[in-house]
Image: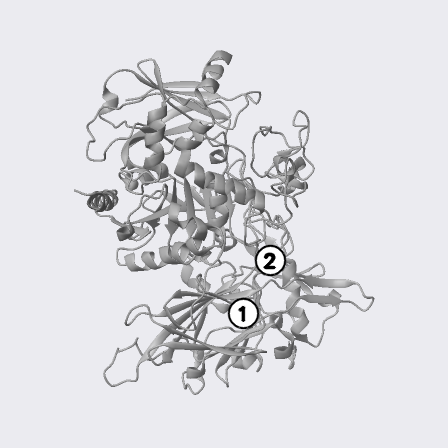
Amino acid sequence: MNRSTISQLARVIVIVAVASAALSGATVKQVHPPPTAGGNPPVVIAVLADHYAAGEEKEFDYDVENFFNFGLLVDGYYEKKKNDLKIVSIFDATPPGQDSIYDFKISPGVGNCAVINAGDAVGKINAALGTLHPVHTVILGNYPYNFGCTEGEWTYVSVDAVGTDVLPHEFGHVLGRLFDEWSLSQHKNTNYPKVIQMSDTRNCWPTRPPATKQPHWKDGNQFPTAKEYPECDLFGKRVVHPFPYCRMGTRNEHPHHPAFCDVCIAEMDATFTYYREWRRIMSQGGINQTTPPSPQASHAPTTPPRFGIVNAAFVEREREREQDPTTDPIRILRFRVEIDPERGSMTVKGRTDARGMYVPSYRRVGRFAFEYVVDGKTMEIGVIPDQVFESHGFRGGAPAHRASDPHPVEVVIAIPNEDTSSIQTGTRQLLLYRIPDSVPGRFITTDTMARLRSMGKPTATVSVK
Amino acid sequence: MSGRKLFLPVAGVALLIGVAACSGSSGGPGSSSTAAPTTKLIIEITGGFAYVPDVPKRTLEIAYLNDVEMKDTSGTIICAVDEIGTELIVLRGKIVSPSAPPNRTFDLDGTVVTIPALDNTTTPLTYNRPIGHPSPAKPSTPGQWSNLQYVPSLKDFHANTGIRPTWRNEVNGRVVLKGGNVVATVPTDPSIEKADFEFRQGTTSKGSFAVTDKIIYTVDVPGTAVELQLTRSLGSTTLKIEPPAPGTPVKLKLHGLHGADAVSSFVQGQEVREFCAFYSLLEPKQPASEMVKMFYNGPPASSFPSGAQPSPGYFCGGDGF
C-alpha cells in the first residue's frame, strides 16, 4: 500500500466518519471542502437545521450554500482561510407544530438575542452532532427573520440574515475571541472594569494602571497606522481599540465595515495558525505541556488513552503530521458542563463520544482554567473563553449589537483519547480554577497550572464517569 | 437610511383599494404542454423603500432614496437621513450571465431594475392596501401581516397629497415590477413583530399600530429564465437567472442596508428618525409642525430576562405612496 493509497483510504475513513456522525434519521453532508477533496481542515463548523419541515431539506441545502459557499467562504478574509475550514451540515426535520428540535424558542432572549434556549438546547445539539467534534455549531433557523445570536458553543442564525455580515462578525468572536470595538450606551462613561493581560494581543487594551504599557499594536512596527481609539469590549472609558474601522466595530460609513482591521487580522491569523500548528507553537515557545494527545489511528478506538510529556522526537513526528492532510481523527470525549462565572461553580450535564481532530484550548482567552485529572495525575488542561459567558445578538449592519452580562452557560470541555467506556475505570475529575490577573502568559501551561494550585483551591471539583 | 418603506398611491385613493389578491395563472416551467413556459419569480423586499404603485399601468416601483436633508424656513435641519445602499441578492437560482459575483449580490447604487419580459404582460398588479390604519392594530397571527396597511403611508396622515411627479429623478434608483401579487409579511425582527408604533403630529396622537419592514412580490415571468435589466448611467446589464431546478422559483432579495449610528436599538418611546425621509418626496411640502413622526412602543422592559437589554435593534419601515 503506497502513500497515495493510504491517503485515499484515510479520506474514505473521514467521509464515513462524517456521514455516520449524527443521529440516525439525520442527513449529514460535508459542504466544504468537497468530500472528495481530502484533507482534514482543523476548524470544523457544524451547521444544523432547525424549523425545517420534512420536505425542506433542499431548502436547507440552499440556505447553507447562501450562508457559507456564497457567504462566509467568499468573504475577503475567510476565503483565504478556506483550506482550514470544514463545514458539515446536518439536516433533521422539525415535526409539524413544533418550534424547534433543539428546544429553541423565538423570543426576546439574553442580551438582545431574539432566541432563547427554552429547554435542553445544548444537550440536543450535542446529541445531533453525534461523533462530530466541531469548533462551533451554527443552527440555521428557518424563520423569516434577520438575526443572529451567539451563546456559548452555538450561534443561532435565522435565514433572513442572509446577505448580512452576521457570521463573519460572530466568527471573529468565536474563533479569534476578538472583542467588540464599541461601548454599550449605558457604559459610555464607565471605566473598563476588567483587566486584560499585558501579553494579550487581541484588539482591546485597558489604559488604566496597572496596564501602563502601551498596547501591543503600538509596540513595534507591525501596525504603523494603528492608534488608540476610545471604546472597546462594550465599555467607553479607559479601554481602546486600534483602528477606526473594523468588522468588530461599528459607526462606519458602510453598513458594517466589511473587513477586519490589521490587528484583528493578525489575531485571526494567529488563531488559524494555532489550530493548524498548535503542537509546534507550544513546543517552540518552550512550553512543556502536560498532555498533548498521542497520535492514534482512527481504526483503533479501543486503545486505552495514552498521555505523555512532549519530547523532541514526538515533536518532530508531529511536525510531519501537521503537514499531512490525512491526519487521522482521534477519540474525543466531550463533557458538557454548566459553569457559573460569578460563583465559579461547575455542573456536568452530560458527555458524548466524538472523533475528530483535537485542538487543545491552551490559549489564554478567559478567566477560568480547567484541569482533567485521572487517578491523581493531570491529563489535560485548558482555558474556558470568557466570551462564552456573554450572549450576543446581532443583525448585521452598522448598529452595534448588545451583549448580556456574564451569566451561567453550558460549554463543552473536550478531552482527547478518552471515551465513555474508558472513563469507567479509575478516578477521574474535572477541576475549575479562576486564573488571577496577576498570572502572566498567553497560554495555560503546566507551570501556570502548578501556580494556580499553589494559589488556592479550585472553584469547583467534580467527579466524572 | 435603514428600512424605508411607505405606500403612497400615485393614482389616487380609489386606485389603491380593493384590488383582488391572487396573481392567478400559470405554474412553473414545463407545467403545461400547451401553455407557454413561465418561471415563478419571488422577490423578498426588506428595508426602507418608497413603494409607488400605479394600478392602471400595472406597475409597482420600489424606490431607494438618496441622502435626505430637509430644512425649515429658518434653515434649521428638520430631517437628515443618510442613504447607505441597496443590494439585490440571488437566493435561489443559477446565474447564467453575467458571471456571478462570488456572493451572488449586486450593488444597486444608481440602478434602475426592470424585467423586460413583463413589459407586455396582461397580468394585473394585485395587492390590498386601502387608505387607513390596519385592523387589527397588531396582528395576532402570521397571516394577518399580509395586509399592506402594516406598511405605513404618509397619505394616511395627509389628505390631498401625493408623490412629486419628478420623484424618479430624485431617488437613487428603483425596481420596476409589472403585474404580479404583493403582500406584506412579518417584520424581519421578531421583537418588532411584538411591538407597535405611535404616530404623532406634534403632541397629537394619530394612532398606534404595528409596522413591518418586509413585503413579498410574486409573479410568473414568461420564459424558462428570469432576465433583469440593470440600467445605470453608464449602460445596462442583463442578469439572467434560471430556476435552481425545474418547476422551482427564482428567489431574490432586495435588501435595504442599514446605516443607523452606533447603539441605535430602540427604547420605549424612541423616535424612528428615518421615517421623516419620505417627506422629501411628498407634495405639497409639509411644514415641520405638520410632519407626523413615528415612535417605538415596544414590549415592556419587564418582559425581558434579567440582565437583558430591552432592545429589538434597529428598524426602518418603508412608506407607500
Q: Which residue is mark 1?
A: B108
Q: Position of residue A81 (x, y in %)?
A: 43, 48
Q: Position of residue A290 (x, y in %)?
A: 38, 21
Q: Nearer the viewer, residue B141 or B293?
A: B293
Q: Name the residue: 38% across, 48% down.
A: A83
Picture disc at residue A171 = none
Q: Residues within 10 Å of mark 2 (few under 14, many from 20)?
A: some
Judging from the image, what secondary structure is the residue with disc 2 in? loop
Mark 2 is on which residue type? His
Q: Which residue is mark 2?
A: A254
Q: Name the residue: 28% across, 84% down.
A: B35
Place residue A211 in its image quadrant.
Answer: top right
Q: Position of residue B315 (x, y in %)?
A: 56, 56
Can residue B123 be seen from the camera position used here?
Answer: yes
| Quadrant for the C terminus of chain B in the image | bottom right
Q: Point out the residue furthest to the left here.
A: A1
Image position of A4 with respect to B84: above or below: above
Judging from the image, what secondary structure is the residue with disc 1 in? loop
Image position of A117 with respect to A309: above or below: below
Q: Nearer the viewer, residue B99 or A60?
A: B99
Mark 1 is on which residue type? Leu
Q: Chain of mark 2?
A: A
Q: CA distance from mark 2 to mark 1?
A: 14 Å
Place residue A318 in its image quadrant.
Answer: top left
Q: How many marks?
A: 2
Q: Position of residue A122 (x, y in %)?
A: 36, 37
